[in-house]
């Protein structure tokens, strides 16, 4: 499989270390306690950043900040999407104002998906999932790039910013950041810069720090937005902060992808389907025979079931360490690890699926 990491496409294995160096990101180190309580931070699933100190300081002083991010609504909501959703819920609990953009304009340019299809997927798959995972309607701006607001003062200022920002980027810069690029993707990149910067306009929140949590493939968009923000003089933007999380591995390794059915576990999957997917497809770090496994032990770092436990389904550090040790020593077999993981995922999804039914009644509260 060829490897590829661009803001529009991620394929194959991702070499995070190389990208961190290439993009000039910093590893996340000393975390305040509230962050350490969260598995995603404690286990370095969220592993790198730009300018995060500003957000940590603001959060410590209990002052206002904005968390802004977006999603391209293609295909089914799967467990890989929970990494970002759990971050919104965490930041909302910390008191941040939450901005979530449905990138329907981007999906139109990058995937050829109609606005209607994007809206349908966002409303049926993504928003109910966010609610079921704990997102509350208070202090949230959930919007579509193609339909920013019914309030024309707000909508005008969002689209005005996009038109004005365009002056502060050059064609060569687009080529350097994105390689091949045409007008549609340029518009999408500029609109994403607007998504990230517009919360600071006076028509929205005003000058507050903005944190953008994303997958590492999105950093080119962040670099572009930061460069533009430095050059733009009509508004004094506080520079953007960002964090980068790992992708949840697909069942066979690589990135979990909604467009390749046997790589993902959807949040709507039944217990039988989960069982079949893990048993049949989940890449194992175990040895080919039981005898060899007992002798040499398994490798949890490449074992997909273990990674799922680490990223979500076994939040207890002691239990996770115990599993890791037993698997490495060969005391625990692949079959045992898989059945434990299946059970954990299914008990999580059982609760989740109940919450999702209730969530459907809440949807209207998010659409203003
Ligand atoms: N490009 C993002 C994706 O592919 C979606 C997106 C749109 C976004 N606007 C954003 C992400 C602003 C972060 C911030 O998923």
Image (cartoon, rainbow, N blue to C red):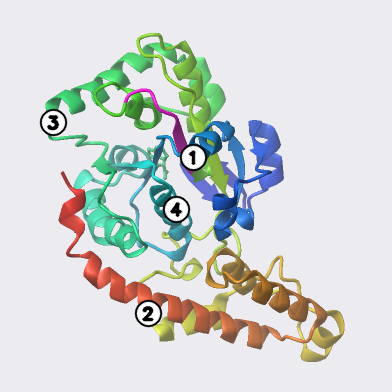
Q: Report which residue position mark 4 lands on.
A: 90
Disc 3/disc 1 C-alpha distance (Å):
30 Å
Which of disc 2 and disc 4 is earlier in sequence?
4
Give SS at disc 4.
Answer: helix
Left or right: where 100 falls relative to 341: left
Mark in front: 4 vs 1: 1
- Can residue 293 be seen here? The reply is yes
Q: Report which residue position mark 2 lands on.
A: 350
Disc 3/disc 4 C-alpha distance (Å):
29 Å
Q: Report which residue position mark 1 lands on.
A: 59
Q: Report which residue position mark 3 lands on.
A: 151
Give SS at disc 3.
Answer: loop
- Pinpoint residue 185: horizontal percent, then vertical percent: 39, 31
Which of disc 1 and disc 3 is earlier in sequence?
1
Query: Do the numbered discs 4 and 1 sit on residues whose CB atoms are within 8 Å?
Result: no
Mark in front: 3 vs 1: 1
Which of disc 4 and disc 3 is earlier in sequence?
4
Which residue range is magenta in the image?
Answer: 206-213
**Can you tell me which quadrant of the image ligand 1 is in?**
top left
- Label 1 Cα neighbours within 10 Å, binned few <14 / some 14-19 / many ≥20: some
Residue furthest bottom as drawn? 291
Mark in front: 1 vs 2: 1
Rendered-image quadrant of the N terminus:
bottom right
- Can residue 269 be seen here? The reply is no
- Label 3 Cα neighbours within 10 Å, binned few <14 / some 14-19 / many ≥20: few
Which of disc 1 and disc 4 is earlier in sequence?
1
Q: Quadrant of residue 247?
A: bottom right
Task: Looking at the picture, tell me which residue is in the foreground, 25 or 286.
Answer: 25
Give SS at disc 2.
Answer: helix
């Amino acid at each position: 499989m060829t490897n590829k990491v661009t803001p529009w496409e991620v394929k194959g294995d991702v070499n995070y270390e190389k990208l961190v160096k290439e993009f000039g990101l910093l590893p996340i180190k000393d975390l305040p306690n509230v962050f350490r309580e969260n598995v995603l931070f404690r286990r370095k699933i969220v592993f790198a950043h730009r300018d995060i100190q500003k957000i940590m300081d603001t959060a410590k002083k209990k002052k206002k900040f904005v968390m802004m991010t977006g999603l391209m609504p293609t295909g089914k909501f799967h467990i890989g999407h929970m990494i970002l959703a759990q971050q919104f819920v965490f930041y909302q609990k910390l008191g941040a104002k939450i901005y979530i953009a449905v990138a329907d304009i981007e999906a139109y340019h990058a995937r050829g998906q109609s606005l209607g299809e994007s809206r349908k997927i966002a409303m049926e798959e993504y928003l109910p999932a966010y609610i079921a995972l704990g997102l509350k309607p208070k202090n949230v701006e959930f919007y579509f790039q193609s339909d920013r607001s019914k309030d024309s003062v707000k909508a005008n200022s969002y689209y005005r910013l996009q038109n004005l920002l365009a002056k502060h980027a050059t064609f060569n810069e687009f080529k350097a950041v994105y390689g091949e690029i045409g007008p549609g993707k340029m518009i999408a990149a500029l609109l994403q810069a607007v998504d990230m910067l517009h919360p600071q306009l006076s028509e929205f929140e005003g000058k507050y720090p903005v944190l953008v949590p994303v997958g590492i493939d999105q950093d080119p968009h962040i670099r572009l937005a930061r460069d533009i923000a430095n050059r733009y003089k009509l508004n004094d933007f506080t520079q953007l902060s960002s964090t980068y999380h790992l992708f949840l591995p697909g069942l066979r390794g690589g990135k979990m992808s909604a467009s390749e059915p046997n790589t993902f576990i959807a949040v709507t999957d039944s217990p039988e389907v989960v069982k079949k997917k893990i048993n049949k497809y989940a890449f194992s770090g175990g040895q080919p025979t039981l005898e060899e496994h007992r002798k040499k032990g398994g490798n949890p770092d490449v074992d997909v079931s273990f990674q799922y436990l680490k990223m979500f389904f076994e939040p207890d550090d002691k239990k996770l360490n115990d599993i890791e040790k037993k698997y490495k020593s060969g005391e625990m077999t692949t079959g045992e690890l898989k059945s434990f993981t299946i059970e954990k995922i299914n008990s999580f999804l059982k609760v989740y699926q109940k919450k999702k039914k209730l969530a459907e009644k809440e949807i209207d509260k998010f659409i203003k």
